[in-house]
């Protein structure tokens, strides 16, 4: 089959990774009549609970990869840390999007920064630390900074604040001496992200940027529209995200995170080669969700420009909510949350709540941003979340 041929409903689509992103991808694809197969070792994983075919194996299991290639008309990923070898093998057997070469860039902060620089997309001042790097030669202007592992970091993990050059060696050792990127600590006014989809023919559609609020390095809330996102900033962010997608010759759904500094500058932060937590609101606030665009890119269906029909505030539901002040486990008051008009509850089927673990999200939609904000604030009060 030629890779750009339309794959009709009834076919099976594969996804590597069984977390909540795989689950929401599967649910979206299934609602249009596609079958979904997931490769995920964890029997109880969120996506494994909802897919028709669950291959309970490691991402590099040859038999499981063989079965995926045989049973699926196309394959995608929900997680960027899939072994490169598995992706290359699959790419030779079945249409795979995004391509392993693009995923490889998004796996590595140093490569992401190099891509931003090559494309002329401004990013944070930084230095790459690899085996043999001379920590004494680092530009003093990068302090105070944040040292981040080049690979495998998420939700603020794999990051250490570094006050001065003298702390750098100890911080690097604390991160295991692996390849790292030292970034200057920036004076952020706010953060935003752009989610877009690009097809095999290069056609591209984007969602309006959402404004993101992080707490303790983890996304706490996404606001769409973002109260501080001016038309100029939105346009610059969409343009930069589009450049990144084109620069990677990307196929699939991609998210670019940005910082806006107090002096007004827009800097690219990082790239995710998949739907993104900050785009979850699109399920409930837009005519086409990020997960629908993911399967559309995979089956070579037309990419429809999403229209946002409701203002939204998305709140992440972390495992912390399942514990009271004394540390006793409890169940959040879902009945009260569900009584809020416009509150859309999404729980991922994770059985063991842990602090900082993403258990679900809640999207509050309304006719106006202020009403969505008020609903979100009421649900914060119900759930015991600190208001924003
Ligand atoms: P990840 O999302 O993979 O954990 P990020 O690099 O996006 O890693 O960092 C997480 C959050 O930490 C960011 O969204 C931002 O709030 C904060 N942060 C990261 N880098 C910087 C920086 N250079 N200056 C100021 N804040 C930062
Ligand atoms: Mg991030």
Image (cartoon, helix red, strand yellow):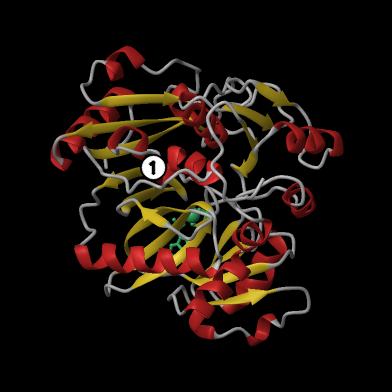
In the picture, which quadrant includes the N terminus? top right
- Observer able to see residue 79: yes
Counting from the top left corner in percent of width and height, residue 353 is at: 54, 25
Judge left or right: residue 306 versus residue 154: left
Vertical arrangement, residue 272 with respect to residue 316, above or below: below
- Residue designated by label 1: 220
Asked where in the image residue 283 lies, by quadrant, the reply is: top left
Judge left or right: residue 314 versus residue 321: left
Query: Circle 1 — which element?
Result: strand
Residue that appears at 57% across and 60% down: 160
Q: Nearer the viewer, residue 18 or 371?
A: 18
Counting from the top left corner in percent of width and height, residue 123 is at: 45, 73
Counting from the top left corner in percent of width and height, residue 91 is at: 72, 51
In the picture, which quadrant includes the C terminus? top left
Vertical arrangement, residue 245 with respect to residue 166, above or below: above
Counting from the top left corner in percent of width and height, residue 229 is at: 24, 59
- Asked whether mark 1 lies closer than 8 Å to ligand 1, one says no
Q: How many marks?
A: 1
- Observer able to see residue 194: no
Asked where in the image residue 79 lies, by quadrant, the reply is: top right
Vertical arrangement, residue 79 with respect to residue 128, above or below: above
Judge left or right: residue 42 versus residue 223: right
Asked where in the image residue 312 lies, by quadrant, the reply is: top left
């Amino acid at each position: 089959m030629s890779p750009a041929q339309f794959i009709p409903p009834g076919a099976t689509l594969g996804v590597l990774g069984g977390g909540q992103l795989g689950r929401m991808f599967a649910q979206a694809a299934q609602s249009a009549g596609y079958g979904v197969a997931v490769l995920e070792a964890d029997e109880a994983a969120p996506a494994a609970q909802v897919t028709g075919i669950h291959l309970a194996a490691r991402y590099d299991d040859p038999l499981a990869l063989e079965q995926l290639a045989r049973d699926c008309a196309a394959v995608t990923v929900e997680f960027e840390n899939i072994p490169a070898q598995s992706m290359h093998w699959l790419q030779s057997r079945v249409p795979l999007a995004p391509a392993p070469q693009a995923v490889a860039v998004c796996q590595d902060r140093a490569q992401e920064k190099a891509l931003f620089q090559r494309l002329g997309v401004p990013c944070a001042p930084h230095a790459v630390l690899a085996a043999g790097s001379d920590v004494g030669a680092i530009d003093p202007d990068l302090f105070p900074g944040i040292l981040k592992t080049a690979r495998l970091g998420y939700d603020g993990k794999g990051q250490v604040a570094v006050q001065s050059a003298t702390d750098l060696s100890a911080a690097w050792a604390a991160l295991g001496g692996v390849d790292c990127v030292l970034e200057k600590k920036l004076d952020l006014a706010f953060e935003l992200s752009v989610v877009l989809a690009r097809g095999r023919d290069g056609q591209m559609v984007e969602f309006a940027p959402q404004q993101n609020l992080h707490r303790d390095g983890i996304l706490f809330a996404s606001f769409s529209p973002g109260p501080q996102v001016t038309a100029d900033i939105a346009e610059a962010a969409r343009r930069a995200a589009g450049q990144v997608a084109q620069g990677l010759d990307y196929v699939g759904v991609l998210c670019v995170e940005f910082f806006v500094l107090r002096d007004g500058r827009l800097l690219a932060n990082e790239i995710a080669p998949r739907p993104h937590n900050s785009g979850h609101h699109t399920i409930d606030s837009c005519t086409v969700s990020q997960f629908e665009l993911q399967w559309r890119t995979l089956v070579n269906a037309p990419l429809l420009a999403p229209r946002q029909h409701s203002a939204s505030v998305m709140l992440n539901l972390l495992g912390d909510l399942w514990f009271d002040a004394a540390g006793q486990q409890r169940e959040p008051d879902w009945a009260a949350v569900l009584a809020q008009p416009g509150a859309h509850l999404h729980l991922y089927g994770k059985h063991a709540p842990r602090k900082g673990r993403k258990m679900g999200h809640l999207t509050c939609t309304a006719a106006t941003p202020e009403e969505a904000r008020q609903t979100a604030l009421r649900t914060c009060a119900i759930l015991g979340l600190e208001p924003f």
